[in-house]
Amino acid sequence: MNQIKPPKGQQINIELGEKEAEGIYSNLAIITHSPAEFIIDFTRVVPGVPKAKVYARVISTPQHAKMLLKALKENVDKFEARFGEIKIDAQNQHFGFVPPKTDEKVN
């Protein structure tokens, strides 16, 4: 588990409620941005169902989005060092967590 390192001499207590501790399953994230914020909608797509529901929305500053990207990269690297490379099926790369197309309009 990655720990948050607060400034020296300062301690952060993080509360995790029962509902939040259960977590949600998401196999698709829709990411949009504006000059002031990044919005990540976590959804779940089920084969044969034409609609996907947003189960969680995270709104963040661009700086925090970049810090999250860095933290995810570090943790994926640690995971792969311990358990081996995470394989991504080339045929299914279009499904799941994908960046928007370069010509796609964002909010």
Image (cartoon, rainbow, N blue to C red):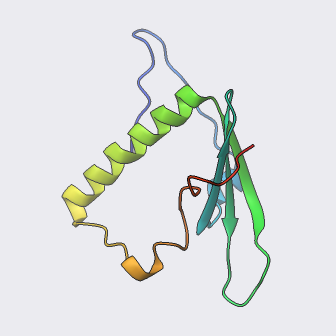
Give the residue at x 29% y 56%: 79
In which quadrant is the C terminus drawn? Answer: top right
Answer with left or right where residue 76 lies relative to residue 62: left
Give the residue at x 46% y 72%: 93
Seen as rendered, the residue at the extreme top is 9
Residue 92 in picture, x, y percent from top left: 46, 79
Answer with left or right where residue 75 lies relative to residue 68: left
Q: Is residue 44 above or below residue 16?
A: below
Residue 71 in picture, x, y percent from top left: 40, 39
Seen as rendered, the residue at the extreme bottom is 48
Residue 41, image quadrant: bottom right
Residue 31 in picture, x, y percent from top left: 63, 51
Give the residue at x 48% y 34%: 66
Q: Is residue 66 above or below residue 10?
A: below
The one of 26 and 52 positioned closer to us in this rendering: 52
Report the number of discs: 0
Give the residue at x 45% y 41%: 69
Residue 2, image quadrant: top left
Residue 62 in picture, x, y percent from top left: 58, 30
Answer with left or right where residue 10 lies relative to residue 89: right
